[in-house]
Image (spheres, rainbow, N blue to C red):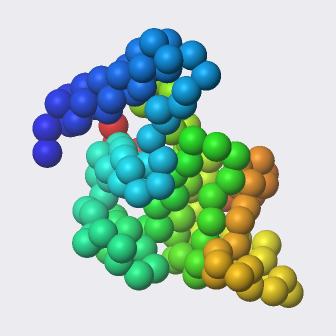
Amino acid sequence: MDHDKFQGLIKKLYSTVSELEDMFPGRHFTPDGHMVGSIGECLVADAYGLKLKTASNKGFDAVTRDGKEVEIKATQSKSVAFRSEPGHAIVIKILPDGRFEEVYNGPGDLIWKQFAGKNVPSNGQFQISLNKLKELNQQVSDSIRVPRIA
């Protein structure tokens, strides 16, 4: 994959969103749903050197060079949702200019423990705030994070 072309397209997409919102005050053109998930998965795969699996793969989205399965979550808001316990998770917040902030990069069990004893929500997804994930991220040793390469 052409890293520079990909980064340019993402920046162009978010620039277009900004221009549309300037043209139509009060209207929002922010990408959402599947588009944000796919953008996030591609941003993380590119930045961390991961191999993406087929979309909607159960339990993980990508694999590291040494075979570690990674669930990727991306948002533009204040929380993300999990249906099951991932082996490893990377959670990002996509910024308005198309760049991203790493919120969490660590073992999935640290996240999943937050849902212990709670009833499964009707939609089957447990929500967790980015603020809570930032707190949990501080407990993760650098030696077990997936290293960023780009």
Report x, y in % for residue 64: 33, 65
The C terminus, quarter of image: top left
Q: Nearer the viewer, residue 10 or 136?
A: 10
The N terminus, quarter of image: top left
Q: Is residue 83 above or below residue 61?
A: below
Report x, y in % for residue 110: 70, 71
Residue at point 70%, 46% (across, down)? 78
Q: Nearer the viewer, residue 42 or 122?
A: 122
Q: Is residue 146 above or below residue 24?
A: below
Residue at point 55%, 54% (across, down)? 91
Report x, y in % for residue 114: 79, 72
Picture quarter containing residue 15?
top left
Residue 101 visible in image: yes
Residue at point 30%, 69% (across, down)? 55
Q: Is residue 37 left or right of residue 108?
A: left
Q: Is residue 147 left or right of residue 108?
A: left
Q: Is residue 85 left or right of residue 39?
A: right
Residue 48 visible in image: no
